[in-house]
Every structure is written in C-alpha cells, then in structure tokens.
Image (spheres, rainbow, N blue to C red):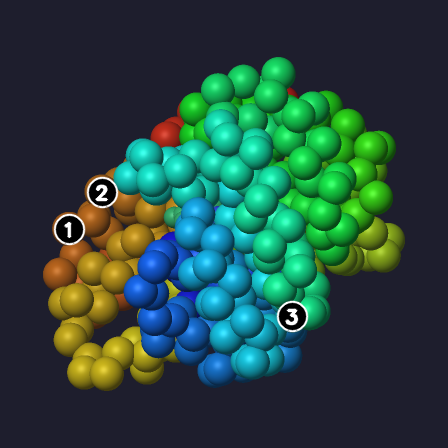
Amino acid sequence: MQDVTDAAFMKVVAEFGAPDYFVTEYFRVHGHYQIEKHILKSITENETGRPVFAQLIGQDIDALVRVAKQLEQYPVAGIDLNLGCPAPVVCRKDAGGGLLRIPERMDEILAALREAVSGRFTVKTRVGFHSIDEFERLLEVFSKHAIDALTIHGRTVKERYQTPVHHDCVRRAVESLPCPVIANGNMVDVSTARAYHAHTGAAGLMIGRGAIRHPWIFQQIRDSYEGKEPKQITRLDLLEYVEVLFETTAAAWKVFDPSKHVNKMKKYMVYISQGLDAEFEYQIRRAKTPEQFFEICRAFMDDKTPLPDFPPEHSKLFCGFRDLL
Ligand SMILES: Cc1cc2nc3c(=O)[nH]c(=O)nc-3n(C[C@H](O)[C@H](O)[C@H](O)COP(=O)(O)O)c2cc1C
C-alpha cells in the first residue's frame, strides 16, 4: 500500500505475525522512469523473513518490460501488475484500474510482461471499471496469459472502497481460471477472512487496511485454520504495537524530525484508532510532539481491556464487511 508498506512497516507486521508474502507499494512506471529508491528498499532491506513481490503500475509496454526485467535482478518473489488503483490521476492515464476499460490494451501488456518476466508474474485487479458486467471479458483476458496468480479486490473501480465486496465474482474467477486466485477486500478479522474464503474457495487471502489496524490478523487466521484459539488482543497489546511501529519507522528517517514523525504516525493511527474511543481519535489528531502522542496513547490504551474484533462499519475506512458474514 502506498506510503504504508515500506521496509519498516513490513518489519513491524512480521513481528506480530507475518503473512506468507508481502507486496511492495507500486512502482509508477513511465517512459524515462528510474526505479524509486525508497520503494526498492522494501526489497533490498526486507527483514521480514518472507518473500516480497514487486508491484508495477503503468501502461507503457516498453517501460513496463524494462523495469520488470530490472526488478527481477533483485530478490523478488515475483513481479505483480496493478490493475486496480482507482485514483483519478492514475486512471486518466489509462494505468491501474483505468486499464480495465481497455481490455485490448490490457491484453497486450499482459502478453509482453508474461514473455519478459522469467519468474512469477502475477496481477492485481478489480472486478470491472464501471460495473461487474465487465468481469467476464476481463477473465477471458486473464485466462490467456499463463499468469501465476490473480489477486482480486472484489469491487469495481467506481466503487472505490465504500461498498461490500462482490465475492460471487471472485468465486467465478476461482472456478474458471487455471491460476490460483487470491481474494482481497474488507477482511478485518478472522470471521470475515474465513467467510470470504468459504464463499470463494480462493487459494489465498490478501489483507491491506485490516493489517494496519490489527497486524495480528495473519497469525490469528493461521491459528484459526489450525484449530487453535486466536489470541485475544487487548488495548495494552495495541499500545505495544504503536510503540514498536513508532520506533521502527522512526529509524527509517535519514534525519529524524520528531514532529514530522508524529505526523507520519497519524497516517497509521487513522486505521489503528478505529473502534477505540472517538475522543482518542480526536486527541491524537492534535498531537504535535512524541511526548504528547504517547501521553494520549497511554491514556486510552494502558489497560488489558479486550479490543473489539470489528472496527465501526460505517466509517469512511471500513464499509460493508459484515456482508461477508
Ligand atoms: C492507503 C492505501 C494505499 C494502497 N496502495 C496500494 C498499492 O500500492 N497497490 C495495490 O495493489 N493496492 C493498494 N491499495 C489497495 C489495497 O491493496 C486493497 O486492495 C484494498 O485496500 C482492499 O483491501 P483491504 O480491505 O484489505 O484493505 C491501497 C489501499 C490503501 C487504503
């Protein structure tokens, strides 16, 4: 995830129960593009013990092929192409989710990248641009190119993040494609993850925002499938996570600036504070120094009350996840 899944954040998640694979935020590939060093670090300085896929976004075939080959020189698990980003500035350039409107172009890009990438080549998509009626055509294109896996964020580009996911589309892909399909979108705890899996029969699950809020989620899901009782997380556990996140991401600055770092922490806190007191969210937004920041965290987290499994459902961040159940 952009501005989130860097080497430091991945390291923190790994400490609390790593997923089987990580994916970098996307490299924005265009004509004269040079690999962005700060994103490359999530590959070259990956301390998670888990493999990482390098994700590309773009629509210039020569540039995509060139950068995919360059990235394969680094220790990547594979090359992943983003066909899901809904940002208008990306879609206007017919990149990311914008490419779903042009299946012929998508077809050419997949063919070129499949030929160029010697290791794993995977794709991340949504279920259409305007409507799920486009999905069958997209599946036809995906099925032509011997991709090694397809991750599906079960919303259209137009739906952005604000709806339930179309798990029936993911199931359709599982049934019709020769490659493993990975389900994504709206999993916030063990029950929503297991429900998405049960609805779709997907080969794997990808979790984004739910892991910022709750990095234990991967281990909890694993435990649940192994018949173990998933660990109940308390506010004190959350405080420990915030402390580790603060310290680990602080070490990544070239020159540490306390107030800039507090602002960086606020980006994570938007997710972490979901389901805690509204007053906590209000106060943390106003913190300026690390001292203020931790004083507020301790005031709201320094006890062993269990955390709610679910974030509030009708916030802007997490919407429609109960539809999975
Ligand atoms: C802040 C943010 C940044 C994101 N950046 C990326 C990205 O770089 N590449 C990508 O494939 N998806 C990106 N996504 C989308 C997520 O990977 C995921 O598909 C989406 O959030 C739905 O899954 P979730 O409910 O588990 O978060 C981003 C999402 C957010 C909220």
Q: Which amino acid type is shown beneath numbered disc 1?
A: Arg
Q: Residue at x 45, y 43 (%)?
A: 96
Q: Residue at x 77, y 28 (%)?
A: 172
Q: Is 306 situated left or right of 324 in this image?
A: left
Q: Which residue is mark 2?
A: 282
Q: Which residue is mark 3?
A: 77
Looking at the rendered image, the disc whose residue lies closer to the viewer, 3 or 2, is 3
SS type, badge 1: helix
The quadrant in which residue 166 appears is top right
Q: Which amino acid type is shown beneath numbered disc 2?
A: Tyr
Task: From the top left corner, tell me how far across and down residue 170 is, in percent.
Answer: 71, 32
Label 3, label 2: how far apart the Cα atoms are: 40 Å
Q: Residue at x 72, y 32 (%)?
A: 140
Q: Nearer the viewer, residue 32 or 180?
A: 32
Q: Which residue is mark 1?
A: 286
Label 3, label 1: how far apart the Cα atoms are: 40 Å
Q: Dot 3, crowdedness within 10 Å: few (<14), some or many (≥20)?
A: some
Tell me if residue 136 comes above or below residue 35 in the rendering: above
Task: From the top left corner, tell me how far across and down residue 310 is, in percent.
Answer: 55, 37
Q: Dot 1, crowdedness within 10 Å: few (<14), some or many (≥20)?
A: some
